[in-house]
Amino acid sequence: MKTVLVIEDDLGIQKQLKWSLSDYELVFAGDRQQAMTHLRRYEPSVVTLDLGLPPDPTNATEGLACLSDILGSAPDTKVIVLTGSTDNSHALQAIALGAYDYYQKPIDADVLNIILQRAFKLTELEKENKALKNNSQQQTDILGNSEAMIKACRVVEKIAPTEITTLLLGESGTGKEVFARTIHKQSARADKPFIAINCASIPENLLESELFGYEKGAFTGAVKTTLGKIECANGGTLLLDEIGDMPLSLQAKMLRFLQERVIERVGGRSEIEVDVRVICATHRDLQEMVSQQTFREDLFYRVSEIILRIPPLRSRGHDIILIAKALLQRFNEEYHSNVQGFSEQATKAMLSHSWPGNIRELQNKVKSAVIMAESKQIDAEDLGLVAPNGNIKMQTLRQMREDVETQAIRQAHMMTEGNLSKAADLLGITRPTLYALIEKYKMYDLRSTDTET
């Protein structure tokens, strides 16, 4: 049964609503403090709110303040404002603050039920859309459900439609180019070129001509005018990978290009305008390089209008297994193999390995394992890894819940300066429930310091 939080101090109207809204489980609150306590405890999707709450029931001030508190704490909550006033100004003010709808008393059960049905239907649609949005990363080459990756993908979604110059920071092999391609694919330039150049893989004396191109006769062997990577990316996106390895002598010319969006080919004299979105990536600490004067400070600020940090594989938990399975499927098709999965020992080995080479290392190990495996399952030995002795240090759901609950209780205890009643309200539970949890987890030091008088 769906829960509706009813914020109403009139007991008669509470009783009327209880009979009128029999299809829902109603939770009643008579004031703002109780409303916020119940909001945390029951996490209702829909709330009805009487604007005339104590201590000033003849004015809408307390009701509007309650509305702001609700939407500040749970912004997706659908708040239906109930008003007994024929003056709609307060109701309209509530709508402006973010209320879902308003209804003028006296209550008509049929009408109110329809409003509630619509509110719950909208909530369901929003949850479905949110789930689809969270899964939109599956349409790219980015794989992972860890919190760190979901956060990174949300940043990608925000910056992709813009022209902001982005700096991708991450260890070697974390997939910086994959992120850059994803930003490109989700931008308005998706149907234009994506050009990547690795500044570390090209000799210093050749990098300038690779980037900016050269005119015929500019140097020995320049038998024809050749476009550089920047011109080739015109209209699209240019990835400057490992920009931390760009020679200091070339950084000034790169800064001018980023500032003015014009280039000069090597041996040329004319300025060429280019329309390019620039994404930079590096595994180096550019700020440290700036302090050591091996990277220009003005160039650093130009390329880092926004910084996206890509987490290393070792910090991504079970994303490791998700990526390994995707790689297994890919290499099965590539090498016409029929390896069906990973053994328990292989899974343990992958989860315990530190992956200094990140996804690139995982890719190499899975590829060789597909080729070398002698059975339908890949073992730890096929991966070139050693499985840990005994069971992997994986917490049970009960242990994880205990850790989370004890941490939350201690944090609430600290925030309320030891007042267990206030801590219980903050946690969205009753005081007896909090005492029971303190007993369960033997947190006797909290019980003995209760400051409530």
Image (cartoon, rainbow, N blue to C red):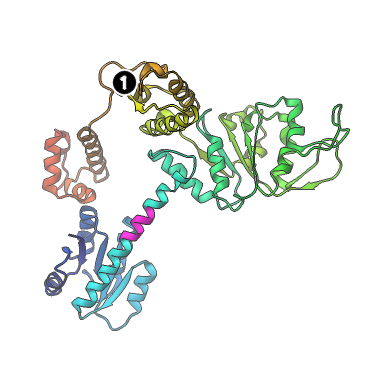
How many C-alpha atoms fall within 10 Å of the one at disc 1: few (<14), some, or many (≥20)?
many
Picture quadrant of residue 268: top right
> Which of the two residues, 354 or 132, is positioned nearer the viewer here?
132
Picture quadrant of residue 51: bottom left
329 left or right, relative to 214? left
Height in image: 368 above or below 192?
A: above
Q: Is residue 66 visible?
A: no
Residue 214: x %, y % from top left: 81, 36
Amino acid type assigned to the residue bearing label 1 in the image: Gln
Residue for point 87% across, 26% down: 220
Picture quadrant of residue 439: top left
Q: Is residue 129 magenta?
A: yes
Prevailing secondary structure of the magenta residues: helix
> Which of the two residues, 436 or 345, is positioned nearer the viewer here?
345
204 left or right, relative to 406? right
Height in image: 442 above or below 19?
A: above
Q: How many marks?
A: 1
Residue 443: x %, y % from top left: 16, 34
> Which of the two residues, 59 or 299, is positioned nearer the viewer here?
299
Q: Is residue 243 visible?
A: yes
Residue at which label 1 appears: 345
> Which of the two residues, 329 or 416, is positioned nearer the viewer here?
329
Q: Pick out the residue farthest to the bottom.
A: 86
188 left or right, relative to 395? right
The magenta-colored residue range is: 124-130
Quarter of the N terminus within the rendering: bottom left
Q: Is residue 70 magenta?
A: no
Residue 248: x %, y % from top left: 71, 29
At mark 1, the secondary structure is: helix
Residue 199: x %, y % from top left: 66, 30
Residue for point 24% across, 58% down: 44
